[in-house]
Image (spheres, rainbow, N blue to C red):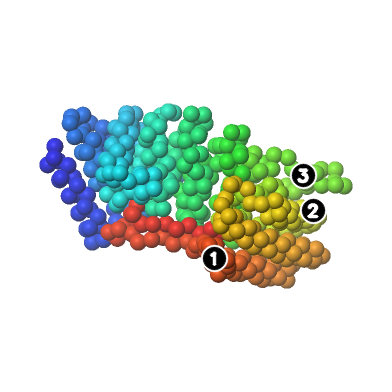
Amino acid sequence: MAVTIKLLDTAAQLAIELAPQFPRASFDERVNLVREMSEFCNKFPRVEGWLDVVVTAAKLGRTSLTGLRKIHLRTEFGYGRNPNPLLPRFDVRKMEWIYMALEHVQTAWQEGLGDSDAEDEEWDNNTLRSINGLLQVLSCNDSLPDNPPVPSLKVILRALCSPTGVAATALLVLSRAKSWFLNPDLQPIMLQFSMWHHLGRVARCYKEEDRSGEDVITDSYQHILQHVAPRPEWKSALFEELPTCITIFSDPSGSRWFDEEPQKLDFISVLRNIWVPQFPHIEGQQQQIEVTDAGQQCTALCLVALSNVWERHDMAKSSLEQFLQLARCTVSTALPWNQILSPLRNFLPFFSSRLCRALAQAAANTRHSIRVGIPGGLDAGSSRVEAHLARRMVELLEMLTQRLEIEFNNPDRLGTEVLRRRDTLRDEIAAEIKAWEESLGHGEEGVPAEASAAQVGQQEGGKEEEGGRIAIAVG
């Protein structure tokens, strides 16, 4: 058994080292590799040491993240989003070995730490490769159980929280396990790991990387949102994720919303279920809104949703990262690229004035928090830092309110000159937000500057590896 494990591990190491010297595997080769490795692990005798064998085999059978995304894109969505029945699908009925192997790897890693607190430690590269190999197989399976073992779920969620590429594989696993989101026994565990924040973090990263709008990572995130949006138990946790939702559903080409009508309708459904359950009445109109174009409905609903989120914004419960995401999303939505809002011209003052009132309310709420003291039982030093940050937030909110009010009160709402003026204004506000963020590093002692650039870290062996770190931008 030890010889088998050594041979497989050596093969896995050689695959990493020699990968840059060989051409990329074809789609069929990737599919066959995953299938054959899975069948090998399913059939391997359950004798002493078998878990180490299947873990090493899964590590050997890993494909690059690019290869895994292509497998998912073609088997799940097909070319042009039409499923291709000729492409292979994985249907592994007995998946217990994967869950047992995941828990085995996690246990071995924890035992290797000795007295260290495992919760505060990151997986080493060998553990990352093992977990990623197992999750790749799991993500290509069509029959995940409704009740996964809790220790295995925690490993999957820990992988999702990882600042490395293995987080994308974990997202793909969760997209195949939609029944897990509806299981009341699993929901508290998902919340414990801040699952929605990390799902959005990963989706935003690959949205920024892939500008074609065809990436399976972002598609999978959209499908998860559509699945859970009608569920009341998730609405509170999802409420703060509006900037990520708008970013993921928007068209990277700059026209704001995708051309496909079904995607717009899906987005409208998500917005109505989570952020705009009741559309505000527009005084003097027989109907609530006379906009039939789905793209314009998306814009109107986004402005209302942003207003609702700002009205409820609580600096004591929101991080600086969430605040900046919301501010940047507000600017890009209120001043969209390359879009003339002619169908909304009669209603734009209503939506814009409501958004400005919400921003002013958020500033007033933050000032109130400063006057009554920062809640949460912070010590004196932390309270000083939090109060300083709160005052800076008020400054930024007041700037946003003033700049947007001036623009929205301008009677000229159509034409290329308006578009150019708004492009300039949007760039100016974006620069002011960036300067505001950077200035935090030079403020009172103890106020840290936040990272503001998306970076994909070093990759192992010339491949997209799970060891490559991903730092997500805060906007």
Q: Earlier in the sequence, mark 1 or mark 3?
A: 3
Residue 318 tag number: none
Q: Is residue 467 left or right of residue 246?
A: left
Spatial CA span between label 1 and label 3:
44 Å
Q: Residue at x 36, y 45 (%)?
A: 117
Foreground disc of the pair 1, 3: 1
Q: In this orientation, does residue 437 appear?
A: yes
Farthest-out residue, left: 3
User: Decide: marks 2, 1 in contact (CB < 8 A)?
Assistant: no
Q: Residue at x 35, y 61 (%)?
A: 458
Q: Residue at x 59, y 46 (%)?
A: 376
At mark 3, the secondary structure is: loop
The vertical placement of 385 against 195, above or below, is below
Farthest-out residue, front: 380
Q: Earlier in the sequence, mark 2 or mark 3?
A: 3
User: Decide: marks 2, 3 in contact (CB < 8 A)?
Assistant: yes
Q: Find disc 1 in the rendering and name its residue.
A: 445
Q: Find disc 3 in the rendering and name its residue.
A: 280
Q: Earlier in the sequence, mark 2 or mark 1?
A: 2
Q: Picture coordinates of residue 369 (x, y %)?
A: 68, 52
Q: Is residue 58 left or right of residue 234?
A: left
Q: Report which quarter residue 382 is drawn in.
A: bottom right
Spatial CA span between label 2 and label 1:
42 Å
Amino acid type indicated by mark 3: Pro
Q: In this orientation, does residue 70 appear?
A: no
Spatial CA span between label 2 and label 3:
10 Å
Residue 350 tag number: 2
